[in-house]
Image (cartoon, helix red, strand yellow):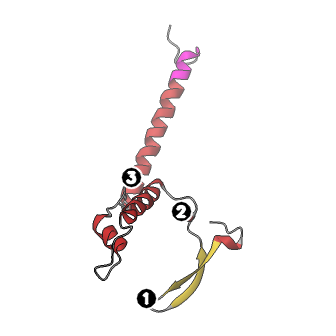
């Protein structure tokens, strides 16, 4: 990520395992969230809204208790192993090569070239 201004940076304070403060680039999803992040944020807000007017009965606020109970994962993808990614990439490249070759053959057949049929 290329840093264009100071708003592209954020100060982070981490407490565990050792207290530490550092500067990092703002994650790209902070301003342009993924579709699943948007769905999760909407679900979070809807669940928290249900707690409006509820009284605190336990150690957690009512909204936090509802979210703990009702929030479920939204479209989370399992990260693939490196070998799976490489295999998919190789297969996709081979498939694209075959498609290009087929298109070229069709083009050559159509133009009275070497492969033209009579």
Q: Quadrant of residue 51?
A: bottom left
Q: Quadrant of residue 29?
A: bottom right
Dot in front, 3 or 2: 2
Quick one: quadrant of the N terminus?
Answer: bottom right
Q: Which residue is mark 3?
A: 87
Check disc 2 and report its element: helix, strand or loop.
helix
The earlier-in-sequence mark between 3 and 2 is 2
Query: What crowding class fits label 2: few (fewer than 14 Cα within 10 Å), some (14-19), or many (20 or more)?
Result: few
Residue 4 lies in the magenta stretch: no
Give how far apart the Cα atoms at labels 1 and 2 are.
24 Å
Give whichever of 61, 23 is nearer the camera.
61
Circle 1 crowding by C-alpha within 10 Å: few under 14, some 14–19, many from 20 = few
Of badges 3 and 1, nearer the viewer stands: 1
In the image, residue 58 lies at what x, y percent? 28, 81
Marks 3/2: CA–CA distance:
28 Å
Secondary structure state at the residue bearing disc 3: helix
What percent of the width, then of the height, locates residue 41? 44, 61
Above/below status of 106 relative to 86: above
N-terminal of the two: label 3 or label 1? 1
Give the main secondary structure of the magenta stretch. Answer: helix
* Residue in the image at 43% along x and 56% along y: 39
Q: Which residue is mark 1?
A: 16
Give percent across and percent down for residue 14: 49, 85
Q: Residue 23, how many percent across, how many down?
A: 60, 81
Asked which quadrant contains residue 57, the reply is: bottom left
- Front-lying residue, 55 or 76: 55
Residue at the far right in the pictured view = 5
Q: Which residue is mark 2?
A: 29
Residue lying farthest to the bottom in this orientation: 18
What residue sits 40% from the left and 46% below the top?
A: 91
Q: Name which residue lies at 33% across and 75% down.
A: 55
């Amino acid at each position: 990520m290329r840093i264009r201004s100071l708003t592209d940076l954020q100060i982070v304070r981490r407490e565990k395992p050792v207290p530490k403060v550092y500067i990092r680039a703002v994650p790209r999803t902070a301003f342009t969230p993924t579709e699943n992040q948007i769905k999760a944020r909407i679900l979070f807000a809807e669940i928290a809204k249900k707690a409006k007017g509820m009284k605190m009965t336990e150690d957690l606020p009512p909204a936090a208790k509802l979210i703990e109970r009702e929030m479920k994962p939204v479209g989370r993808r399992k990260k693939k192993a490196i070998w799976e990614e490489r295999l998919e990439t190789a297969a996709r490249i081979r498939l694209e090569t075959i498609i290009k070759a087929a298109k070229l053959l069709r083009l050559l057949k159509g133009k009275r070239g070497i492969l033209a049929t009579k």
